[in-house]
Image: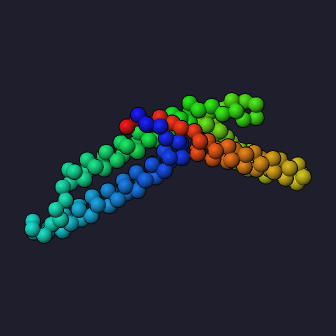
Amino acid sequence: MSKMTILEVLKKIKHVDRKIEKSKERLSRWCSYYDIDLEPDQAPLYNTEKLLQSLNDLIAMRGSYRHALHKANIDNKIEYKNKTFSIDELLVLRTHTLPEKKKCLKLLIDPLKRDKSIDEIENEMADLDRILDEINILRETNINR
């Protein structure tokens, strides 16, 4: 088990995603050669079992990183507006709840009230962005690998 910041885990997930795509392309390329019915001495010397196992290992690794990230988002508590939230709750607030409130406010007829309320929501979203960025950089999580 090792410790990483949330940002490091996010970078690892992105890196593993790229490796998965490359492995899929390599496997697909081998299959396209195989379909052409080349002579055995002309076919690429790929071992499909190893390629497939490598791809499965990468997918499992991505799953362990994602699990650790979700666990960290649930377990880590943050004080925000005199209340305690999990990172997960703040993410839902930032990505779903506040944008939906903003959409609803756009339906208000009174432009002064509407604009003031939208500004408040946008300020809150900016605050949450700042807090979540700090958390991503500073908070550590345990990774089981």
Question: Residue 5, percent across and down?
Answer: 53, 42
Q: What's the image's color scheme?
A: rainbow
Report the quarter where the N terminus lies: top left
Horizontally, residue 97 falls left or right of residue 117, namely left
Residue at 67% across, 48% down: 129
Residue 108 shows up from this direction: no
Horizontally, residue 59 falls left or right of residue 11, namely left
Question: Residue 99, percent across and down?
Answer: 70, 48
Question: Residue 124, percent across and down?
Answer: 75, 45
Residue 87 shows up from this direction: yes
Return the residue nearer the eye: 133 or 95.
133
Q: How many marks?
A: 0
Question: Residue 138, percent across and down?
Answer: 59, 42
Horizontally, residue 108 falls left or right of residue 20, namely right
Return the residue nearer the eye: 27 or 69.
69
Whether residue 84 is situated above or below residue 125 in the rendered picture: above
Residue at 43% across, 53% down: 15
Whether residue 69 is situated above or below residue 22 in the rendered picture: above
Residue at 45% across, 48% down: 13
Report the quarter where the C terminus lies: top left
* Quarter-of-image position of residue 26: bottom left
Whether residue 92 is situated above or below residue 34 in the rendered picture: above
Residue at 64% across, 44% down: 134
